[in-house]
Image (cartoon, rainbow, N blue to C red):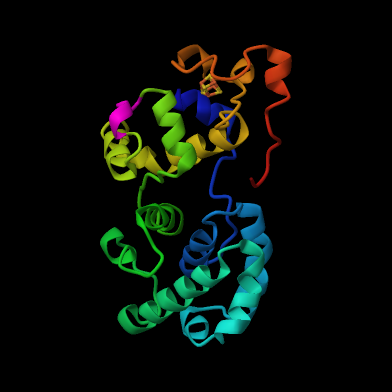
Amino acid sequence: MHRVLAETYPEAGCELDFRTPFELLVATVLSAQTTDRRVNAATPGLFARWPDPYAMAAAPRLELEQVLRPLGFFRAKTDSLLGLSAALVERYDGEVPDRLDALVTLPGVGRKTANVVLGNAFDVPGLTVDTHFARLVRRFEWVEPQIASDPVKTEHAVAAIFPRKEWTMLSHRLIWHGRRRCHAKKPACGACPVAHWCPAYGTGPTDPVLAAALVTTQGPA
Ligand code: SF4
């Protein structure tokens, strides 16, 4: 299934725009409860004004809130950006650490965000258990149903199946498939390249024409 997903989505990768580990860290924190497309629309203006942790830690709260307002939960996201920037300045000389245990101590940074940053900014393999990843591995029966609601247990269970070097790209491919075909409510089963092996085949329409209409277009989701 992984091989077929790799062939189906050769362009799969991080859908957040970034130039530095700091930009990816910020973009990933901002992507909670919104789309990558919206984050990508907001970050150029954000980084033009506050390009690094030193500048962002000193940003006036109200100005930062205004820039983040279109992303929703903007007060909480402002708190996270001010807090994580200050922590980077105080504890890491303004550099983003390349270790999971250090990243998860930063305000607003959980295991999922840390693994996105490790995998895409530092080439340290990581599994990114977001809502798509969790749904797909449950449908594929790669994890037991009773642990599927626990992201950390899910991460460890999938890590035991795949070689470490594949973790980052496996995450991208699962997330791309989840965004484009294997939707939460109506998966496009009749237009799915891994249907042959999928225990959840039939969760969505199996008619090829109906299913094809459910496949979303490529590009940032
Ligand atoms: S067959 Fe359906 S449920 Fe299974 S992976 Fe494909 S779209 Fe998802």
Closer to us: 165 or 17? 17
Tell me which residue sits at (35%, 26%) in the image. 142
Say which of 117 and 186 sits in front. 186
12 on left or right of 220:
left
x and y, in percent, of residue 3 in the image: 46, 25
Q: Is residue 111 above or below residue 22?
A: above
Residue 80: x %, y % from top left: 45, 71
Q: Residue at x 67, y 73 (%)?
A: 45
Is residue 59 magenta-colored? Answer: no
Q: Quadrant of residue 183?
A: top right
Quadrant position of the N terminus in the picture: top left
152 to 66, vertically: above or below: above
Residue found 46% across the figure and 17% down from its top: 198
Indicate left or right for 146 with 189 as reference. Answer: left
Number of disc labels: 0
Q: Quadrant of residue 145?
A: top left
Q: Quadrant of residue 130?
A: top left
Q: Give the left or right position of residue 159, taking residue 75 as reference.
A: left
Q: Which residues are magenta?
A: 142-147
Residue 133 percent coordinates (x, y):
45, 37
The vertical placement of 61 against 217, above or below, is below
Image quarter in which the C terminus is found: top right
139 relative position to 34: left or right: left
Rendered residue at 52%/28% (across/down): 5
**Residue 175: x, y in percent?**
51, 39
